Amino acid sequence: MKQRIDGVTPPYEPEIDRALHRWMPPGATREPLMLFKVLVRHPELASGMQVLGEALLFHGRLRDADRELVIARVAARSGCAYEWGVHMAVFAEAAGLGQEQITLTATGEADDPTWSARQTALLRAVDELHAAAQLSDEAWSGLREHLDELEVLELLVLAGWYRTIAYVANGLRIEQEPWARALPGS
């Protein structure tokens, strides 16, 4: 399927080049992501999105492994091969997720014995949010056993943010990055 909105192409105008590099992690050597190349077509929207995305990805309170587990599960449950593939290629291992865990974010259940109690609580919360846009008392209690109030608040915003990213990537049929991992079963 063809991507529905093309991304900007090099050579970039100076303002676009600066915007694209603000999206990328410091010291990144890869070409900016196609998602970013599409978003910068709408500079005001991209600028606002970049602030929240950066805050969640680089300045959040959640542990890196928790963050990447939540992102992977949201992307997998949303069928967003693009975002799942990028995060699992770039961040997952560095955050401490093993190969089996990476695969299970897409294919496994929250109660799989591979997961710790903390990870199970995170996965159950994401699964409930995905299914019903709310948390049961049981899921809430599970989260609160492992996360403080600010971390839970961040988790809810993180899950919603990456659901939004899934809408954008899936709705526009953003082309997979050539170096990204393939979403199991896609």
Image (tube, rainbow, N blue to C red):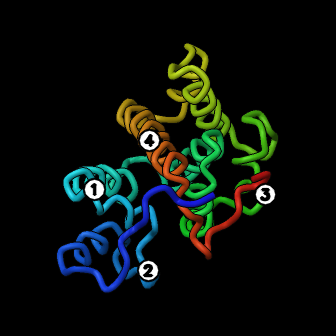
Task: Bin the neighbour count of mark 2 within 10 Å (Cα to Cα): few under 14, some 14-19, many 20 and up.
Answer: few
Nearer-N-terminus badge (4/3): 3
| Residue assigned mark 3 | 100
| Disc number placed over residue 184 in the picture, else none | none
Q: At which x and y percent is residue 76?
A: 65, 46
Please tell me whether residue 137 is drawn above or below residue 65 in the rendered image: above
| Residue assigned mark 4 | 164
The N terminus lies in quadrant: bottom right
Of marks 2 and 3, the one in the foreground = 2
> In the displayed structure, does residue 114 sit left or right of residue 24?
right
Nearer-N-terminus badge (1/4): 1
Q: Residue at x 49, y 40 (%)?
A: 163
Identified by mark 2, the residue type is Glu
| Residue assigned mark 2 | 31
Nearer-N-terminus badge (4/2): 2
Q: Residue at x 46, y 81 (%)?
A: 30
Q: Disc 3 versus disc 1: distance between alpha carbons?
A: 34 Å
Task: Bin the neighbour count of mark 3 within 10 Å (Cα to Cα): few under 14, some 14-19, many 20 and up.
Answer: few
Element carrying mark 3 = helix
| Residue assigned mark 1 | 46
Nearer-N-terminus badge (1/2): 2
Q: At which x and y percent is residue 90?
A: 55, 69
Q: Residue at x 58, y 58 (%)?
A: 82
Q: Disc 4 versus disc 3: distance between alpha carbons?
A: 27 Å
Identified by mark 1, the residue type is Ala
